Amino acid sequence: MNLPNEDESSHGRADVESGASKIPKQLGGLQKTITMAQIAKAAGVSQGAISSLLNDRDYGIRVSEKTRERVFKVCREMGYIPNDLRAVVRMYPEVGDFCLLVTSECETGMRDPLTPRLISAAMAAVPDDAHPLTLANYDVNANYRAGHINLPQPLRSGVCSKFLIYGPPNTSLYETFAERGIPVVSLGHEVAAPGVFSLLFDYALASRMAVSHLFQLGHQRLGIVSGPFGSTDPKILDFNRGVLLAHEAQSLPIEGQNIIQGDLSVRAGHAAFDELFSRNPRPTAIFCMSDAAAIGVLFQAQARGVKVPEELSIIGCSDDPGLLWSNPQLTTVHLPVEEMAELGVKEIGRMVSEAMAPAAQKTFLPARLVERGSCIAI
């Protein structure tokens, strides 16, 4: 599936307008012969304010959030259905589409091995009677408060009301959601903002589980392939904390020289193996904070004539299905990506249907060890 580009906005608006008369089947029994004058009288506001709200146009009339809520409440009570699908979704958010926003390719994007897993699982989790999941991207560094046209197309068009976001937080984007009263589920990143439910991986548990497993197998000289030097990424900080906790539980010191830092790519795994095996004594096991780096270590070990797992045990983190072809297959820590996507779709549907505007919430999804052939006891 291709991500829509920002220059597709005119096409997206045409789609919205052409679908204006396509009333969602959930609203088929409501009245359709109610005038703006009747709504204005019932809500105690001017017809101009009603027109501004329902047509999503600025007629020079300032409408407060409180007034907006009152108008939409009156419309729902009267059973009014606007002609514009965008106004329908604003008034009845439960009938809006699901949307998954992922950051652009230069950040997390499609090069993150977790992204395809998350997209596939989210698409499968959308209820059968809803519209298909809309997929779009956002810019981590953009200022989305600068103007309406700058917003991601699904948010700008107004036909989506159930948003999930995967990628580093953009404060201005979340502020925009808050201003519009739209709840959001953040996948994999904590966002301490009203109306946001953060679903998180327990990276500290994942690394502690991996290192503890190696200790239980009798390994004490461990190599650690960590993230970039000086990284402030919460994920890397949590990974490092878990490594520390596992060592403390065994009353073993961490040998700083055996912590190799890099971008956790396959190439970083190659370099980490060469550096660790240039030292004496060599590690008997290596934990990598990504499966890609672990595969890099595995390939380089085999290229250098080091037998895995007989001479070196290796464990990764992620459980990327695309790496199951390695020989031996990689022992790893499973990050519950599919479970996160499924729960995210369920939670955002609940938040919208129950008209919730909760305080910031978060929950951690537990990791689990997946034992395969790249680790043995010594």
Image: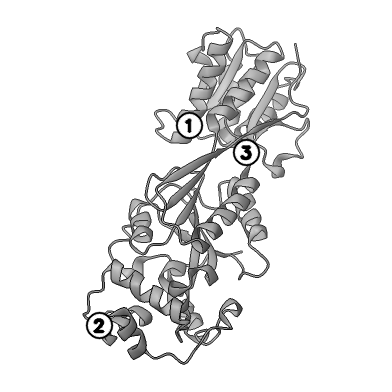
Is mark 3 in CB contact (under 8 Å) with mark 2?
A: no
Q: Residue at x 51, y 11 (%)?
A: 255
Nearer to us of marks 3 and 2 is 2
> Quadrant of the rendered structure where residue 281 is?
top right
Which residue lies under the disc numbered 3?
335
Residue 332 lies, with reference to residue 128, above or below; the image says above
SS state under label 3: loop
Count neighbours of disc 2 (C-alpha within 10 A) and say few if under 14, some if 14 to 19, many if 20 or more.
few
Q: Residue at x 53, y 12 (%)?
A: 248
Q: Residue at x 64, y 28 (%)?
A: 297
Count neighbours of disc 1 (C-alpha within 10 A) and say few if under 14, some if 14 to 19, many if 20 or more.
some
Q: In this rendering, does residue 232 appear at all? A: yes
Count neighbours of disc 3 (C-alpha within 10 A) and say few if under 14, some if 14 to 19, many if 20 or more.
many
SS state under label 1: helix
Task: State which tag comes first along the sequence, 3 or 2.
Answer: 2
Nearer to us of marks 3 and 1 is 3
Residues under labels 3 and 1: Cα distance?
A: 14 Å
The amino acid at mark 1 is: Ile
The disc placed on residue 266 is: none
> Quadrant of the rendered structure where residue 308 is?
top right
Q: Residue at x 61, y 55 (%)?
A: 119
SS state under label 2: loop
The disc placed on residue 59 is: 2
Q: Nearer the viewer, residue 363 or 234?
A: 363
The amino acid at mark 2 is: Tyr
The amino acid at mark 3 is: Leu
Nearer to us of marks 1 and 2 is 2
Which residue lies under the disc numbered 1?
236
Q: Nearer the viewer, residue 242 or 184?
A: 184
Is mark 1 in CB contact (under 8 Å) with mark 2?
A: no
Residues under labels 1 and 2: Cα distance?
A: 49 Å
